[in-house]
Amino acid sequence: MRIKSQRISRSGLVITVLSSLLLSTSVFSSPWKDSDFISDSVTQAQLSQSAKPQGEESQSLESLKYRSLELDEFAWKSLLQKNTSSKPADDQQDNSAAGLSLVLPLPDGTEVEVVATETSVLAPELAAQFPGLKTWKVSGVNQKISGRIDSTTLGFHAMLVMPNGDSVFIEPDDNKDADRVTSSSAKYISFSKQENHDHFQTEFKCGVDHNSVVKSFSEGNVLQSSAKEVLARPAFNLITYRLAVATTGEYTQYHGGTKTSALSAVITTINRVNEIYERDSSITFQLVPEQLDLMYTDSSNDPYSNTDINALLEQNIANLNDTNVLGSANYDIGHVFGSGNVGGLAFVGSTCNSTFKAGGATGATNPIGDAFALDYVAHEIGHQMGAQHTFNSECGERGVGTAVEPGSGSTIMSYAGLCGTNNIQNEVDAQFHVVSIEEIIDFSRNGDGNSCGSSTAVTNENPIVSAGEDFTVPARTPIVLIADGFDSDGDQLSYSWEQADSGTATDVDVDAGDNALFRSRSLTTSNLRFIPQLSDIFNNEAAVGEHLPVTNRDMDLRVTVRDGNGGVQYDALTMTVHDTGSTFEVTSHTSSRTYAQTDQTTVSWDVAGTNSSPISCTSVDIGLITLDGTGIDITTTANDGSETITIPENAPALTNARFIVSCATSQFFSVSQANLTILDTLGTGEDDTSTLSSSSSSGGGGSFGYMALLLLPLLTRRLLSRQSIS
């Protein structure tokens, strides 16, 4: 069936939130209040900021953006305990009709309504011991929001994945107050990851000093079946792995010194890890009943070397496999958390292996927050689940055959922030690359990871997606990628367009002819991706990790859709690049000017041989586009380099618009260089061809025009009309 445009047009790049008034009109009195305190602990404790790379200054608190809050924890805990709908972790159905309605404060001063459904990360026996340690899965009521919250002896914590891919966190200002007494006025902060990029810089190393110490107990973990075939099957059952997490005495002391406080910290971390694994691979981890026996309070007599990652790994295998401590038969995957600045180390594909299943270790000076949970723990568990590194630069243990991200990369199995001048960004985004998803799903369903864990049937159906047909483009030319997605359960989908070429190891933004050029970006509800992103095109800026190809080559491009309930699907296409020796680009309108309805002007562009084989683009579409996605279709004409056009008679008023010339039969385009203003009044109908460099306006007769859908400009609407899913 054809996907309706109104479904796909919900891009979610503009976050719609409830107003502050919702707090006062809700069925309950809000326990959240704004405050004006200045956080003393947020820089290190909440953002897990380690030292900046050598030679750089540490970020100051003054540059941090956060919202100061006070929480009546008495009222909040009472609210969480009342009318909570308990739900097993293996039930991934839509939460909109069940659970607890909550209003959470966002960093920008607004609030968002979510539904929280209890999904314990504790084994039932352990949960019964600690009825006050609770975790929930949350989903947005009016927006595509997902996330996790918890209430422990260390307070309340929230991680929300927003529609634009940003992660929002709500944390206690002092997150190391062990066994805190519930207060009527506790200090909290709410902050955005995207707004605080520099504060998420870490020193995490997957292997000491970036040397080749990522271990494998076997000769790699080559996919045992076609990864695309794996993802094409019906939605997977949910696999629950019994996770044993040991903690060093130093880690426990960092979190307050008691086993309960250390358990609380581990719960927060694993709850966030589960958010990613359940969504991307239908896998969840549950802490074993014997968990308290693995949490050490005294560093002088624990079995671990907190400052030696290699020793930690070997010691954890010996300790957890000891039948006097736990025993290999009583867990599926094991890990140890430390507080030394040692990074991470793991045996690749060790889950379920009777000898090496405890082969995972993670240590950080500040073992807390998003950086620890995702950059560190989710990354190392990814190795244990069969995933290799995805970064392509030579800055560590590069994965052969999986180096599909330019530079440092930005997804969980990347080295974001660790590759110096090859960094794409400082921190990982809360998602796996499609290649990592392939590895994890194949390992857990067809490989050694299928020999343990418990499988629970789900009623969720996998979404379906089409990337469209293969196409050919000229070198050095922007492109737009458009997918058609559909979900029979009615789940709103998130999209991610990525490149999957693992070629020659290169520095970022170097085209070696076979390597990764296009970075992964945060998940979005928009089905399209501009490369480079429109803001960089309009500002004439070169975005790191979106280097346009300059050689003759083929590029493997894939779009992955997620339904948020463990359903994942992808489709691929091949983009062939042909270097004609020149660049397809708009050459007119290099200075700003103003037009009115019915004005005429001549748009010129360099054809650059694109009207000949193998590109064979014989006609182009001409229109107007703005940075926010508003657009006007004007005409389709021969790809001959020049056309006199008329501003449509019913054209809306536009500011900072550009002329866009796009191939009518492919997916490449170019926009003019200067901002234009379009008035929603009739002009004189004159042709301005002789005065294009002038800043005054002239006019002419016109034709019908219309406003493009928000964030779906004319190019994408035209391309979308040619695609459908049966």
Image (cartoon, grey):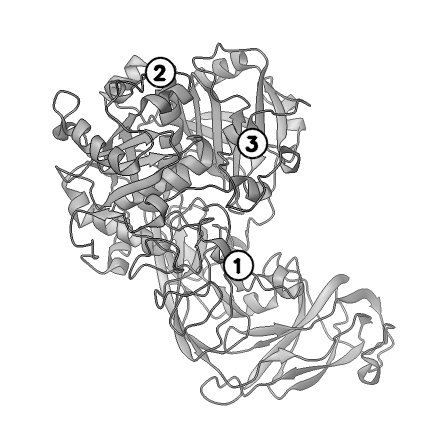
Task: Say if residue 513 shows up in the picture.
Answer: yes
Query: Is residue 534 placed above or below 116 in the rendered structure?
Result: below
Residue 481 spot, x, y in % from top left: 49, 65
**In terms of depth relative to the viewer, which is nearer, 701 or 563?**
563
Rendered image: mark on residue 5 = 1
At label 1, the amino acid type is Ser
Query: Is residue 370 placed above or below 406 in the rendered structure?
Result: above
Q: Secondary structure at mark 3?
A: helix
Which of label 1 and label 2 is nearer to you? 2
At label 2, the amino acid type is Thr
Residue drawn at the location 47% of the way across and 69% of the way down = 510
* Mark 3 and mark 1: Cα distance apart in space: 44 Å
Residue 89 spot, x, y in % from top left: 31, 31
Q: Are marks 1 and 2 in contact (CB under 8 Å)?
A: no
Residue identified by numbered label 3: 43
Residue drawn at the location 15% of the way across and 50% of the way down = 218
10 Å neighbourhood of mark 1: few (<14), some, or many (≥20)?
Answer: some
Q: Which residue occupies the extreme front position in the image?
A: 55
Q: Secondary structure at mark 2?
A: helix
Rendered image: mark on residue 260 = 2
